[in-house]
Amino acid sequence: MKKAGFQSIFIIFCVIGLLVSGCSKTSNQPAEGPEDVVKKFYAYIKEGGPTTLGEAYKLCSTKHYVQPEDRFRDTVSKFSKDMKVNVLGSKIMKDKAVVKIECKVPSVFGGDFVQESDINLDLDEKTNSWKIDFTGETLTSEQGSGVSKTVPGDN
């Protein structure tokens, strides 16, 4: 009888262990977090060139709108090569994420032009990876244009 009781308890603990490990919060999380995707995206854009811009394009969400790649390349080719992007923080809400960034661009008046923005990302269920909402289709009314403040800075 004790052997049967021990086996029952052992089986119950094994089942509980499997349920907990299978239902854990991180079990289906993408390998790369939203902050890493944003850093990689801006690194590709800064580097430029057809290959890296193609890689940056692949990091864009197609959930709400598919922007033609040539239009994407034209848009990002106008970004300053001197732009520095720093990630300030992020927040994940189920299948959406918001990454707050700070962009610094040298100003013609001296110092840096500094701008903070929120970058929205969608979780692509097919690839289980974060994708950037490059066209701003998921902006909320609270985010407005995505710009939280613009201030002149110093070097």
Image (cartoon, rainbow, N blue to C red):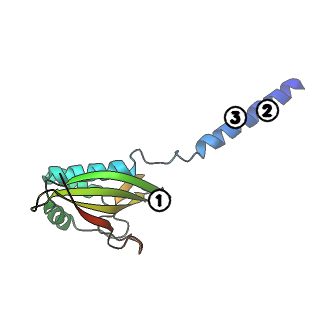
Q: Amino acid at mark 2?
A: Ile
- Tell me if I can see residue 87 in this picture: yes
Q: Which mark is residue 3?
A: none
Rendered residue at 21%/56% (across/down): 104
Asked whether, in this view, residue 27 is left or right of residue 117, the answer is: right
**Residue at point 84% right, 24% down?**
3
Residue at disc 1, secondary structure: loop
Up-down relation of residue 116 to residue 3 (above or below): below
Q: Dots 1 and 3: beta carbons under 8 Å?
A: no
127 or 93, which is in the foreground?
93
Residue 145, relative to residue 69: is it above or below?
below
Q: CA distance from mark 2 to mark 1?
A: 37 Å
Residue 6: name its quadrant.
top right
Judge whether 88 appears above or below 140 on screen. Answer: above
User: Which disc is residue 95 wearing?
Assistant: 1
**Seen in the image, is 134 located left or right of residue 20?**
left
Report how many numbered discs are placed on residues in the image.
3
Q: Amino acid at mark 1?
A: Asp
- Residue 9 is tagged as 2
Q: Badge 3 is on which residue? A: 14
Q: Earlier in the sequence, mark 2 or mark 1?
A: 2
Instruction: Point out the tag, 1 or 3, that comes first from the N-terminus.
Output: 3
* Image depth: mark 1 or mark 3 in front: 1
